[in-house]
Amino acid sequence: MGRATLKVGGYTPFSATEYPGLLSAVIFVQGCPWRCGYCHNPHLQPRTGDSPLPWDGILAALARRVGLLDAVVFCGGEATMDPALGEAIADVRALGFRIGLETAGIYPDRLASVLPLVDWVGLDVKAPFSLYPVVTGVAGSGDPVRTSIAAVQASGVEYECRTTVHPAQLPPTQLVALARALSALGVGHYVLQEFRATGCQDDALVTSAVSGYPGEELLERIKPLFPRFSVRRNH
C-alpha cells in the first residue's frame, strides 16, 4: 500500500488575508467532529472516504505557484483530523512555501507533532472551556483546547488565538470571562471575529445576529488584557 494522502475538500489558489501579511494559497482539509452552529464551511464537516480533490493535483498546482505566493495555509474542516497532515505539510514546505495552520485545537497530539513544520498558527477558541459543548455540540470538547494552546505557546511558533463572536452564544459576560481566561494563560495575541452569516445553516443564529457586536464599550474591557488585540469586522 502507498502512503495515505491528505483528504482535500477545497482549494483557494490565492488569498491576501488568510496568512497575516503574506500572499497564500489555502487548502481546506475534509472532516470535522464538531458541529458549531456558525460554521461557514459545513460541507467540510463529513469525513469522506476519498479525497474530493486529489492531493497530487494540489501539489502540482502549488508547484506552478512557486515564486508567486509566499505561503500555504491548511485549514478545514479540522486539518489536524487527517493523519496525513504532517506528510502533506512536509510536501508543501519542500516547495519553499511558509506554512500556516488554522485549527480549533481538537487534536493536541497531532497538532504538537506538526508544529515544528509550521510557521504560523491561527487557533480558534470557541467559548469559556466549560461552555464548549453549547457551541460544538460535543461533550468535553473544551478539554483538548487548553492543551493545544499550551502546545502552541511552548513551540515558539507565531500564533494568534481568535474567537467568532455571536451574542446568542457569547453574551458579554461570557466573552469577557473567555478573554480573561486566555489572558491568564499568557495568550499574547487575541482576535475577535464578527459572526458571518455566509454558509451558516443555523437560521436562528442568522436571524439573531447583531451587526457591530461586540460594541466599543465591551472591546475596551477586553483590549487591555492582551499585548496585541484586534477585531475583524464584516465588510
Image: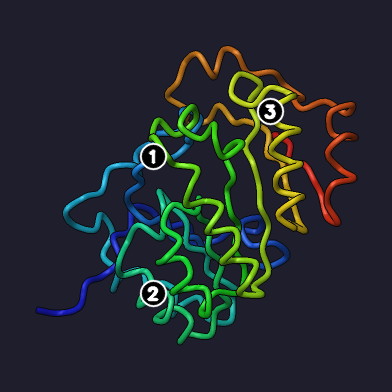
Sequence-earlier tag: 3 or 2: 2
Reply above or below: 53 against 218: below
Q: Position of residue 195 (x, y in %)?
A: 62, 30
Q: Amino acid at mark 2?
A: Gly
Sequence-earlier tag: 1 or 2: 1
Q: Give how far apart the Cα atoms at labels 3 and 2 are.
A: 35 Å
**On-image quarter of the C terminus:** top right
Q: Position of residue 231 (x, y in %)?
A: 77, 41
Residue bearing the label numbered 2: 86
Out of 123 and 26, give the one closest to the viewer: 123
Q: Position of residue 6 (x, y in %)?
A: 30, 66
Residue bearing the label numbered 1: 34
Q: Give how far apart the Cα atoms at labels 1 and 3 are.
A: 20 Å
What residue is shown at x 55% (from left), y 73% (from top)?
A: 99
Residue bearing the label numbered 3: 174
Sequence-earlier tag: 1 or 3: 1
Q: In which image quadrant can residue 167 be found? A: top right
Look at the numbered disc 2 and give the secondary structure of its residue: helix
Q: In which image quadrant can residue 137 be found? A: top left
Residue extending farthest left: 1
What residue is shown at x 57% (from left), y 48% (from top)?
A: 124
Reply above or below: 94 against 4: below
Relative to residue 138, is residue 40 drawn left or right? right
Q: Which mark is residue 54?
A: none
Q: Amino acid at mark 3?
A: Gln
Look at the numbered disc 3 and give the secondary structure of its residue: helix
Q: Amino acid at mark 1?
A: Trp
Q: Nearer the viewer, mark 3 or mark 2?
A: 3
Relative to residue 196, is residue 44 drawn left or right? left
Relative to residue 202, is residue 85 drawn left or right? left
